[in-house]
Image (spheres, rainbow, N blue to C red):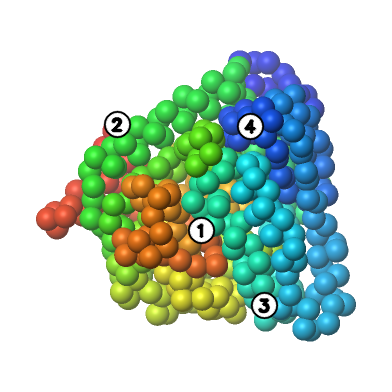
Amino acid sequence: MTEAATGEVRTQPENLDRLAEAAVHVGLGLQPGQELVMTASLDSLALARRITEHAYRAGASLVTTLFSDEDAALMRYRYAPDAGFDHAAHWLYEGMAAAFRSGAARLAIAGANPALLSNEDPEKVGRANRAVSHAYRPALELITRHEINWTIVASATPAWAMAVFPNDNLDVALSKLWEAIFATTRLNTADPVSAWRAHDAQLQKRAAYMNEKRYFALHYRGPGTDFRLGLAEDHQWLGGGTTAGNGVYCIPNMPTEEIFSAPHKERADGIVTATKPLSHQGTMIEGIQVRFEGGRIVEARATRGQEVLERLIDTDDGARRLGEVALVPHSSPIAQSGIVFLNTLFDENAASHIALGQSYASCLRNGDKLSPEELSARGANDSLIHVDWMIGSAELDIDGITPAGAAEPLMRGGEWAVSV
């Protein structure tokens, strides 16, 4: 049981139901008659079922859930022939893209074991990830262009809970992780839907402020970081919810504390050091530090997962360039929880971050109407990957650089220097 801010005590099933309701009505904005394609692990079955019920109650015409099994995933690395690691289920991803083109919404339940593949052959992991990236590209483009309404929510799972709370027994770890999920997704309020709408409005105000400033670049300074990042031409800042190309308003990430935009793919220079570990496709990468020249990573190292990092940035030319920049204050509820979630959905909303790879077309003015060539001309990056990693902390200062070259305080000590 958990106690809400109002003093009301709620059971686990009640909180799961509230999370499912918020995912469907706030995160997705699911419309009557719309299909839903959902992905989840077998360990997330309880939440998937609650979401399915709320989706049908909201008028979904069909809910299709694709379940994954981590034990089965490990069997591939133990028993599959070597040539199989260059293969992905193209038919499955083509089907997902077809569903999105026909109007289906997309919901992902996060909660995978962050270190599932850490003991497997990095060469095989890299090949398998690359094959999936190629196969998933048509569906990913519809998501990065925000053509559809989509969202991501999280479910506590045994392996994830034990990775986050390794000194607790399983029941305690699961309870702690669920409590953290409920708190950071604003379920511990009298009316979570209203709380989300108020939070969304504040993020929209911060994004509007940045769009009025029209900074040319951002300059980051902190321990191990001295980095200048140019912004794409005609960039726009987004935060909280967005109206998808199908006209549906959705909040893609639950939780979310960021405002984000498109960096210029050729205007990143300097050294950047990660402030949190990165869990990527079942492998852990820690102690990341990279050096950019002319927008491209020219040096990269990690204290753990070096080979995985190298294979990641070798996916294609765009994998060495940036596709997203996001600003998050250190006072974020996720940062203040003191928990390192080992899950990008949460950790990226605890700290300012950047993302290697594909840009979001929606982060450029009228980007959904621009061709790939026009997007590239404005500085948007193109890649098979989109991988966020965290660089923010209580010691990070950021200046906004005006088109005239003047530096204006934007963040100091990880907090906004200007209120809105």
Few, some or many C-alpha atoms within 10 Å of disc 2 (few <14, some 14-19, many ≥20)?
Answer: few
Amino acid type at circle 2 is Val
Q: Is residue 30 above or below residue 129?
A: above
Check disc 3 and report the residue beneath it.
127
Dot label at residue 420 = 2
Q: Is residue 109 above or below residue 192?
A: below
Dot 1 amino acid type: Asp
Marks 1 & 2, CB-CB < 8 Å contact: no
The kind of residue tagged 4 is: Leu
Select label 1 or label 4 by which is in front: 4
- Going from the N terminus, do you reach mark 4 or mark 2 first? 4
- Mark toward the start of the polypeptide (1 vs 2): 1
Above or below residue 206? Residue 263 is: below
Q: Residues within 10 Å of mark 4 (few under 14, many from 20)?
A: many
Residues marked 3 and 2 touching at CB (< 8 Å): no
What is the crowding at mark 3: few (fewer than 14 residues within 10 Å), some, or many (at least 20)? some
Q: What is the secondary structure assignment of the residue under circle 1? A: strand
Residue 411 placement (x, y as % from top left) = 30, 46
Cα distance between the residues tagged 3 and 1: 20 Å
Residue at (51% x, 76% y) in the render = 316
Residue 162 visible here: no
* Secondary structure beneath label 2: loop
**Looking at the picture, how far across and down is residue 50, in whole percent?**
78, 32
Residue 388 — which label? 1
At label 1, counting other C-alpha atoms closer than 10 Å, the crowd grade (few under 14, some 14-19, many 20 or more) is many
Among the two numbered marks 3 and 1 on one chain, the one whose residue lies closer to the N terminus:
3
Is residue 418 depicted above or below 279 in this figure?
A: above
Residue 133 % position (x, y):
62, 67
Distance from Cα at disc 1 to Cα at disc 4 = 26 Å
Q: Earlier in the sequence, mark 4 or mark 3?
A: 4
Q: Nearer the viewer, mark 4 or mark 3?
A: 4
Which numbered circle lies on residue 30? Answer: 4
